[in-house]
Amino acid sequence: MTMKTILAGATLALGMATGAFADGHQTKVGFVYVGPVGDGGWTYEHDQGRLAVEEHFGDAVETVFVESVPEGPDAERVMTQMALGGADLIFTTSFGYMDQTINIAAKFPDVKFEHATGYKQADNVSVYSARFYEGRAVQGHIAGHMTESNIIGYIASFPIPEVIRGINAAYIHAREVNPDVEFKIIWAYTWFDPAKEAEAATVLIEQGADVILQHTDSTAPQAAAQAAGNVVTFGQASDMAEFGPFPRVSSIIDNWAPYYIARTQAVIDGTWESTNTWDGIGPGMVGIGEITDAVPAEVKASAEAMVEALRTGEYHAFTGPINKQDGSAWLADGEVADDGTLAGMNFYVEGLTGDIPQ
């Protein structure tokens, strides 16, 4: 074997080892965030996924991000700048970026886009989300057992199917263990506004709620509950464990890292295709934070059993009999909701009061 052959073989091995550098191209991955990376919830966990991409790929991948991008025209500006800046893959991480993602993707057909929690796809646009409603079912189960006032407060963000699913899943499972339970819902019309979230929590507590659930992203409701005293809370999107063991007694944790790594790898390999991913507790995209000892042992055990049943698929969080709010039948006894209905859910289940805002 000649020295020239040895060097050629070494060069080939290096190219195979470095992946993205084989053609002299470092893969660039962008992230568009609706909140600040320090929100302690939704955006924090997406950024943990970005950091996992950096750790996994090292110098083969460069990541960039822009935080606190409003859902509107400014999002198109940010996405355009990322695409012009050489991004090969862009994750747009909030529902309200859906139309903007589609618009910009059409202008940059060689860039791959991944939109979180939306439903509009294109040749270069994938969508992905987590089955957060599975975690809401577990929270509702615990909340129904722990409330003494029988009033559970819910801070909702926007009246989109994802949020409506969460309210329904929590209510169904709270009512299952406590038929006297009542939900009071405040629509905050924001994903992240600590002052507004704290005010909503305070109002709900003043209305008698001794459990607060939230579909907003800051830790402000946790702090408000802590200040109020005997009020139970659950972490949203992130563990929020700094408020444990009480008032935060468990949490829903969004684990985006494996998905972000896999989709980045697909771009590097040239195998990326437009897909629709909706994963839950089973695949690990939804995690349930530690249930603290503030929860009675028998309740903790039954909640953990529910988590396991959801993980294995033995149980579905929307299993009949379930009626709609107006009393009309939705799911017969033992019938399981189909994904199409869940994805477009625009109704409350029987027992919830009030109207869904338009």
Image (cartoon, helix red, strand yellow):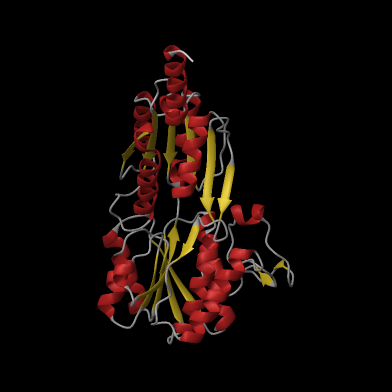
Name the residue nearer the viewer: 311 or 175: 311
Question: Residue at horizontal 39%, vertical 56%?
Answer: 189
Count of numbered labels shown in the rendering? 0
The residue that appears at 55% across and 33% down in the rendered structure is: 272
Which quadrant of the structure image shows residue 239? bottom left
Outermost front residue: 1
Q: Nearer the viewer, residue 289 or 342?
A: 289
Q: Quadrant of residue 173?
A: bottom right
The vertical placement of 69 against 353, above or below, is: above
- Where residue 148 sits in the image (x, y, percent)? 43, 87
| Left or right of 58 on screen, residue 338 | right
Q: Looking at the image, can residue 353 be seen? A: no
Residue 12 vertical placement versus 238 (above, below): above
Q: Nearer the viewer, residue 103 or 51?
A: 51
Residue 72 in which image quadrant? top left
Residue 244 x %, y %: 33, 74
The answer to whether 37 appears left or right of 137 in the picture is left
Answer yes or no: is residue 91 visible. yes
Question: Eyeballing the image, is 76 above or below 294?
Answer: above
Image coordinates of residue 236 in percent, x first then y, are 40, 63
